[in-house]
Amino acid sequence: MKWAVIIILGCSVAETTLGWTYHHSLNTLNWKQAREWCQTNFTDMVVIRNQSENDYLVSWLPNRTGTPYYWIGITKEHPNDSWTWIGNNSTWIGNRSWAPNEPNNNHSTEFCVEIYVNTNSNRGQWNDEKCSNEKYAVCYEAQCNATSCERGRCQEVINSTTCLCEPGFEGDRCQTPVKCPRSYQPDDGYLICSKGNGTFNTTCQFKCHGFLVIGLSEVTCEATGEWKGPRPVCSSYKQALLAVAGCGALSSFFCICFCCIKHRKRKKITQERQPEDATSPPSDVNG
Ligand SMILES: *[C@@H]1O[C@H](CO)[C@@H](O)[C@H](O)[C@H]1NC(C)=O
Ligand SMILES: *[C@@H]1O[C@H](CO)[C@@H](O)[C@H](O)[C@H]1NC(C)=O
Ligand SMILES: *[C@@H]1O[C@H](CO)[C@@H](O)[C@H](O)[C@H]1NC(C)=O
Ligand SMILES: *[C@@H]1O[C@H](CO)[C@@H](O)[C@H](O)[C@H]1NC(C)=O
Ligand SMILES: *[C@@H]1O[C@H](CO)[C@@H](O)[C@H](O)[C@H]1NC(C)=O
Ligand SMILES: *[C@@H]1O[C@H](CO)[C@@H](O)[C@H](O)[C@H]1NC(C)=O
Ligand SMILES: *[C@@H]1O[C@H](CO)[C@@H](O)[C@H](O)[C@H]1NC(C)=O
Ligand SMILES: *[C@@H]1O[C@H](CO)[C@@H](O)[C@H](O)[C@H]1NC(C)=O
């Protein structure tokens, strides 16, 4: 119960951290200059990963009444290449990303993309343009850095960053190894953990106050926060002695019964076989 509460708290803390932010230039630049301006002052030119990000960006940018509009970070190098986002080679393009009749590759040289931010019906849609044209730059500033998430991957969405933790770690920065419950102890026994207090990827030994451990004496804390292996139990001297005595008594009883039955059976067989033996020929007659 306690651990469940901690896991839930960890997630909510991660959600409240601020994610990447958008910025735009006040002057127009060609696409290459615009990207350089973004890289100098922020992280890079804006990357749009899905339609809701596109809609958010458009609602955030100031409306323009006509060209020039804003450069976005999707481009290609040759006419036959596919349109590719800067950064991670994503090729995401939504069903209604391109404005009607775009991309038209006018003059076979339009390898950069602008986004219409206006009040017309093509608001928020894209148009391929010559990279040497001058437009406003739109940049993003990442909040994730090398130290954002200790044992996980930092993911940025609009206005928030989230640490996606590796299995076995939790917390807003994935800094805490998952803990296995201390209550998991055999009656009459206790856990000895060499390190980590019974956290993920550590091994603990079971010891008994009494006599012996039935089950594995060593358990490992798994990524799920559970001990691996069947729950061991401790046995006291008394129980052990009783068990041995009980076993002994039981086996002697069975032994006696077994011998008794066998003895009777043999006696019966001998009695039946005697008259038969007199008339039958020797068994190796065909040999
Ligand atoms: C993008 O693709 C190019 C060419 O295939 C490759 O050299 C580059 O490493 C890729 N970049 C990323 C971030 O995947
Ligand atoms: C690029 O980033 C997007 C959004 O983060 C992700 O969905 C996509 O899988 C990434 N692509 C590659 C090739 O890494
Ligand atoms: C192609 O570009 C020329 C001049 O750059 C322009 O006059 C013409 O309308 C464009 N054609 C299309 C289909 O956009
Ligand atoms: C920009 O235009 C859209 C569509 O007409 C409108 O909803 C929005 O309020 C405008 N934004 C600003 C900042 O004026
Ligand atoms: C890295 O990002 C975290 C938030 O994710 C921030 O608190 C920290 O100051 C940043 N560190 C550096 C060196 O920028
Ligand atoms: C689109 O991006 C937003 C913000 O980055 C994110 O919250 C949402 O989950 C994404 N949606 C899909 C379908 O990927
Ligand atoms: C184990 O937990 C105790 C109390 O919670 C703490 O004092 C001790 O430093 C911890 N040891 C390790 C190795 O984490
Ligand atoms: C688990 O512990 C071993 C030895 O201490 C280490 O080599 C390994 O990287 C750890 N695994 C994880 C997922 O932390």
Image: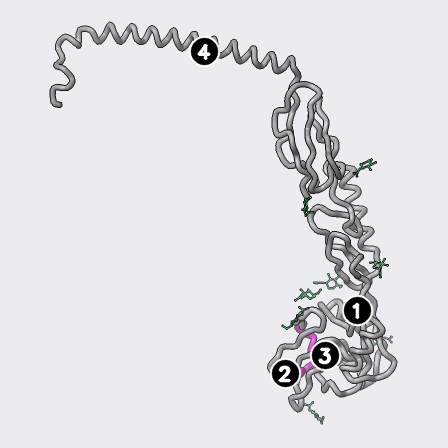
Within 10 Å of disc 4 (Cα), the crowding (few <14, some 14-19, many 20+) is few
What amino acid does circle 3 point to? Trp
Within 10 Å of disc 1 (Cα), the crowding (few <14, some 14-19, many 20+) is few
In this rendered view, identify the residue nearer to me: 216 or 81.
216
What label does residue 78 carry, if any? 2
Residue identified by numbered label 4: 254
Residue identified by numbered label 3: 126
Q: Which circle's residue, 3 or 4, is located before the other in the chain?
A: 3
Residue drawn at (38%, 6%), measured in percent from left and top? 260
Q: Which residues are magenta?
A: 94-103
Helix, strand or loop at mark 2: loop
Q: Which circle's residue, 2 or 1, is located before the other in the chain?
A: 1
Residue drawn at (64%, 88%), measured in percent from left and top? 108
Query: Ligand 6 near label 1 (Cβ, under 8 Å)?
Result: yes
Query: Ligand 8 near label 4 (Cβ, under 8 Å)?
Result: no
Q: Are marks 3 and 4 in contact (CB under 8 Å)?
A: no
Q: Which circle's residue, 1 or 4, is located before the other in the chain?
A: 1
What label does residue 56 carry, if any? 1
Helix, strand or loop at mark 4: helix
What amino acid does circle 1 point to? Tyr
Q: Position of residue 15 (x, y in %)?
A: 80, 55
Query: Ligand 1 near label 2 (Cβ, under 8 Å)?
Result: no
What label does residue 73 carry, if any? none
What amino acid does circle 2 point to? His
Helix, strand or loop at mark 1: helix
Q: Which circle's residue, 1 or 3, is located before the other in the chain?
A: 1
